Image (cartoon, helix red, strand yellow):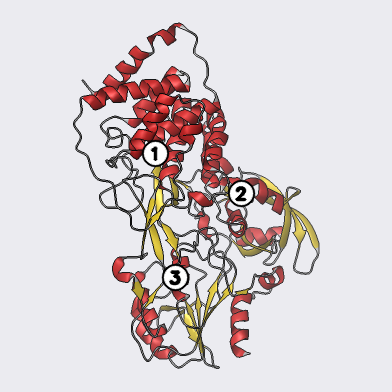
Amino acid sequence: MNPNRLLLLFLLICTTASFSQKKKSLSDTELQTIAKTWGLIKYYHPLVSRGKIDADSLLLTALAQQQPAKKTIANWIAFLDTRSKSSNIPAEPKNVCNDPDNRNFDTRWIQTDKNLDNTQKKFLNGIVTASSAPGTYYSQDKDNIRYYGKREKVYKEKALEENYRLLTLFRAWNAIEYFAPYKYVISKKWDTVLLEFIPKFRQATDQKSYDQVVMEFSGALEDTHSEINPRPNASILGTYGAPFTFHMAEHKMVVTKPIDAEKCKAYGIAYGDVIVSIDKEPVTRIIARMSKYFSASNPAIQERDAFKYLFYGPEGSFTIQGYDVNNKPFDKTIARIDRSSQVWFEDGLPDNPLIYRDEATQKIVYSKRYDDGIGYIDFGMLQAQDIDSLITVMKDTKAIIFDLRNYNDNYQLLKILGFLLPEPAWFGISTKVDFTQPGKFCYQDFIIREDYKYIGKKNPNAYTGKVYVLINEETQSVQEMWSMIFKKVPDVTFVGSQTAGADGNKTPILLADGRELIFSGVGIFYPDKTPTQKIGIVPDVVVKPTVSDLQNHKDPVLDKALAIIRK
């Protein structure tokens, strides 16, 4: 007989009597117990964790029966014991972790949960402390060091039904519970997040409210990497937006670029206009209200990502209140334009005047040498094949500025550190999931690969000038790792503002509707185990653009670095 049908038959037999009574809706606390117990069984029980028993069927059957948590878990244990007696699974040893990170691991809830009896507590503690390792059917692919959930089932046609909405929540919550390296830095207790979202998922009965609560759950991770893919932004906010983009400075919105220049001119919208409210609501209040739907590691990212929702809506219009570059106030009504073809993450950033196309060579120019012996390199545009020629140009400068306010994941660029470093340097470590003990992690003494543990080389002719690195909230993920590497350069100075605080491979959790919830799946740390998540890279010299800087096309971060060097 099909094992899943056997499961259903067994649980139905166990609960025949309950169907003669009127089913009562389970309380949120009972559902919390069921969710946590199910997750522990899913990742620790020798049969379920190996995919021999379908984890979803266990949960969905229980949710359909609506029995008290204690009865549900008693049925699970009885069924699992029956199946275990007829199964012969060879034991596998647990991992020996020489440098463990157990900050995320906490099973004390088993002893304190009032919905569990002593027998159930003993059973759950027993599978956690068993000498043999659980399986990795739901969590790992081959030797991958981060969570892998591609074997989860998808239920697109049923995803909006209440039990499947709860399945989505319980699946995602438990994946974070056991496999998110930064769970411990979330400001709310993760148990509290589960209890908070159970009623929200139960009440999300239509597509829009369901999309909203899924996005809000992503926001609860407080991880700038986190998002729902494909993004449901359009279904929630609409595909119509402003005919211009903007950038935040001093908690104010500054128009930085027209998308539809003709319409902007007709409405009298110009570069440098400052918008303080939309439809009479202050911009800062809108950000505070809407930012819960967009995951952010720190407040700087909450403002950076405001372009994702400010102005968006259905076809129609909005009003803006503010003042122009001459401080003349305005109150204007603007018709939205169709922005459905726009890429969300390409909004808002001012043009970089240091990058231009050289028509003579038909190449993008992203580096220069000033007349007074200062070099500038936009690291986001740097290409490995250009490093040798750049070194020739820059080797006798008195200082080089590397601009990391951008993105470049080409590891061949490590070559340039051989020019900057006098000897090899160890720049960082990472944590990988201990799949033999879900919830625990192991430190490994490298980030990229073991053969990249040390960057640079023994170089008696290393660069002797000053090195300055420009960073801000756009410096995210691999750019933050590059920043960690540049910190090993002798006498380096970081100028700008706090970075995004989101590093570690983007890792998907497959939801019941087929979409993915992304989170940072690998922990990234300095060699002394100082974290970067949420904190990001902290500059030596703090500089943030002002409204006036944006209005006058100034780059105060670069200007400050140049001023320090020239002084």
Report the side of 309 relative to 3 (left or right). right
User: Residue drawn 31% across and 30% down?
Assistant: 54
Image quadrant occupied by the C terminus: bottom right
Q: Position of residue 255 (x, y in %)?
A: 66, 63
**Marks 1/3: CA distance?**
34 Å
Q: Secondary structure at mark 3?
A: helix
Single out the residue that lies furthest toward the right.
328
**Residue 43 in sight from this viewpoint:** no
Residue 291: give its label.
2
Q: Which is more toward the observer, 35 or 298?
A: 35
For marks 2 and 3 on the same chain, the one whose residue lies earlier in the sequence: 2
Q: Can residue 48 be seen here?
A: yes
- Residue at label 1? 514
> Rounded to the nearest whole Å, what is the CA distance between mark 2 and mark 3?
28 Å
Relative to 95, residue 548 above or below: below
Which SS class for mark 2? helix
Asked which quadrant contains residue 60, the reply is: top left
Query: Looking at this view, is 200 or 312 the one in front?
Result: 200
Tell me which residue sits at (69%, 67%) in the image: 272
Whole-percent x, y for residue 257 in the image:
61, 64
The image shows residue 364, relative to residue 103, as above or below, that is below
For mark 1, give the secondary structure: loop
Q: Residue at x 45, y 93 (%)?
A: 396
Q: Amino acid at mark 3?
A: Trp
Q: What's under tag 2, amino acid-wise? A: Ser
